[in-house]
Image (spheres, coloured by chain):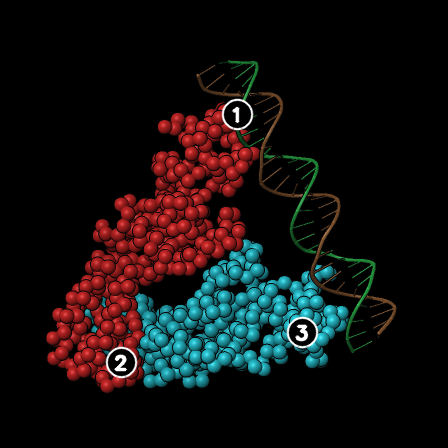
Chain colours: A cyan, B red, C brown, D green
DNA sequence: TGTTAGCACTCAGGAGTCACGAGTGCTAAC
DNA sequence: GTTAGCACTCGTGACTCCTGAGTGCTAACA
């Protein structure tokens, strides 16, 4: 639909606007572009682009800014070719991950902080999900007469722990024994199944070992009940305050809504997870394309990382709609690839 | 130095300013106060108070606002009497803590969010320190051939874990055996000592059991090395964005400095920890009294909570200097008391 | 001697006006 | 199809003026 020239102009406008955050005028383009076109010509093209919905005019005597549709076209068609990182940059990303291997749980945290530093936007990382991971070990460490710490280690190397209080009347010894039985019986079983199926299966076994069965069950439930919820992976946010660097968030009220949203990890995770299940590996949600109303002035670029072909987590960058897509997208692409490599290598057992 | 009447006026000015965030004029006071004094009289007193340094005038034709010294006097002398929570409120605070016992690690987090909700300021909680706590259990759970998760459980019920990579050439079995030996040898020893003393002590023992001693030592070091650092307790922040509610932070630049500071947990922890070692149980740092330059427009009210007489953590509220001290101080006092009770009861083993 | 009424003075903030300039749309000529 | 020229638009910043809240001071009062 668009002529070559129109696409070029649209691209130049987006590029300029991303950089300056101010409406781009025809003269600016005519001076920059190699094609020797006068401002008047550009103006005609701009008018056409506006009519087609790719550009907007904040007010009559201002330049043009890209519309949501404009960004979308830019991302879909004007970016793909040659939008890759240089070999040097790829190396740089990789080196950041190889430095401190062996602290898997912190990788997500580090990635968030690194990514936000690099982009000057806010970074979000959804830690590896443990849905189809299995139980590796279940342990109980007594602390005092009535308290103990229950430990759950998953096949992905994640550790979950919960302090449990032991009801009066039951010796800690008994509970310890119960956990030892469970450890043997349950290891290797997927986490999400443990609660439903495994519980029944071991009921008989347990009853044999224990007197006060009912009470003991309650203790166990304290540990197991949260496995479902908690197996969802944690959220890591980096560079929240970078949002305040952007001119579009100089208004405190506007900034507050976004920052508050970022504080509600549940909501953020939901937004990220919906991308995880999407078809593509890399998602770009521009402004109103976000389901969340709060993000109508923001863009969220996300990439999933995988283990053995299955998506296990999400890396994302949140910024204003006027985002430097040309930089963020390849970067995120590379990072998610590197994370996939890393996690695959690590979890391969 | 101050007459009764001057103190009353100072108190009224602070009370009003805290509420309205706008300079308080003489007429406002004369209308409110029960003492039948005209605005002119109040003006005279105000002029005196200003001369003494307790009040300030933003500009000639404006009302007065409390100076740092004014707040200090208010906190020190005008607040103490009857500045306690009502019995009902005390109950309310207590009930919030009794609801979900058994999740000690989350208490700090919950307190932060609860406190920020209640005050509309930002809340910071320094989780229980584990300095003089001892090792309860040290365990290794193998994940794959070359990786394993090391678990450290402390006498306070906290769990630390780290993924370790096992160097080629050493069978996981050997490492497992080493950990079992260590578990027995080290349990009961204070965390901060483990690295220095215990290592030497068990060297001989270990050498007997293992062939590739050097390499194994490296694995162990991965686990132990971070104990010192990590035993410092974690920081929990709640209601960061509440800062943006305050009129004094409507300027994005001002807000950004404070919010960014809050993102640097190390710095915040340092600020809190300096209060922990201070004499009093309850600290009020008003504006420039804070060492941190960033906080010169803020006040930080902190209270320590204890276990067995020794301070183990800090609860704090961060807000503008124009803070509702009359509300925050008793609240924080009560919360720290309740936390002390709670932790004491819990850690008593 | 402390308190009050009255009055002149100050000053931040909002409303109104104006000029500037960046940018557009349109028309006519190339 | 492209461009030069020109009239038109409109946000922005500078300037002025006005208002009202609040002060300080003085003189009178109890």
Is B33 located above or below residue D26 in the figure?
A: below
Question: Circle 2 sits in a helix, a strand or a loop, which is it?
Answer: loop
Residue B47 appears in the rendering:
yes
Q: Would residue A348 appear left or right of C19 to someone viewing this image? A: left
Q: Determine the residue positioned at 52% across, 47% down.
A: B247
Residue at horizontal 36 percent and vertical 71 percent from the top: A106
Residue at the image point whose x is 58% and y is 80% from the top = A80
Residue tagged by mark 2? B166
Residue contact between numbered discs 3 and 1, judged by CB atoms under 8 Å: no
According to the picture, the residue beneath numbered tag 1 turns out to be: B40
Residue B259 quadrant: bottom left
Residue B100: in sight, yes or no?
no
SS under mark 1: helix
Do the residues at discs 2 and 3 belong to one chain?
no
Of circles 2 and 3, the one toward us is 3
Measured from the top left, where is residue B167 in percent x and y? 26, 82
Question: Dot 3 corresponds to which residue?
Answer: A33
Q: Chain of mark 1?
A: B
Q: Residues within 10 Å of mark 2 (few under 14, many from 20)?
A: many
């Amino acid at each position: 639909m668009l002529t070559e020239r129109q696409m070029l102009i649209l691209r130049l406008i987006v590029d300029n606007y991303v950089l300056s955050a101010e409406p781009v005028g025809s003269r600016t383009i005519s001076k920059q572009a190699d094609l020797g076109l006068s401002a008047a010509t550009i103006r005609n093209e701009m008018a056409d682009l506006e009519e087609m919905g790719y550009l907007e005019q904040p007010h009559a005597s201002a330049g043009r800014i890209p519309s949501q549709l404009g960004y979308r076209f830019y991302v879909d068609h004007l970016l793909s070719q040659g939008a890759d990182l240089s070999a040097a940059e790829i190396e740089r990303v990789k080196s950041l991950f190889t430095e401190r291997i062996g602290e898997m749980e912190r990788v997500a945290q580090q990635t968030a902080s690194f990514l936000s530093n690099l982009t000057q936007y806010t970074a979000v990382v959804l830690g590896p999900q443990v849905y189809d991971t299995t139980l590796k070990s279940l342990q109980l460490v007594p602390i005092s007469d009535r308290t103990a710490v229950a430990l759950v280690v998953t096949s992905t190397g994640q550790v979950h722990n919960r302090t449990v209080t032991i009801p009066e009347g039951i010796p800690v010894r008994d509970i310890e024994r119960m956990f030892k039985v469970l450890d043997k019986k349950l290891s290797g079983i997927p986490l999400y199944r443990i609660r439903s199926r495994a519980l029944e299966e071991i009921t008989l076994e347990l009853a044999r070992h224990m007197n006060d069965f009912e009470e003991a069950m309650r203790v166990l439930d304290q540990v197991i009940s949260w496995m479902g919820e908690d197996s969802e992976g944690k959220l890591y946010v980096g560079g929240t305050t970078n949002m305040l660097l952007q001119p579009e968030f100089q208004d405190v009220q506007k900034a507050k809504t976004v920052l508050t949203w970022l504080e509600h990890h549940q909501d953020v995770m939901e937004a990220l997870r919906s991308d995880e299940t999407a078809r593509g590996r890399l998602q770009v949600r521009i402004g109103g394309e976000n389901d969340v109303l709060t993000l109508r002035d923001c863009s969220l670029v996300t990439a999933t990382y995988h283990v053995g072909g299955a998506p296990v987590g999400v890396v994302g960058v949140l910024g204003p709609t006027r985002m430097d897509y040309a930089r963020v997208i390849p970067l995120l692409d590379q990072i998610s690839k590197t994370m996939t490599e890393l996690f695959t290598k690590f979890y391969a057992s």
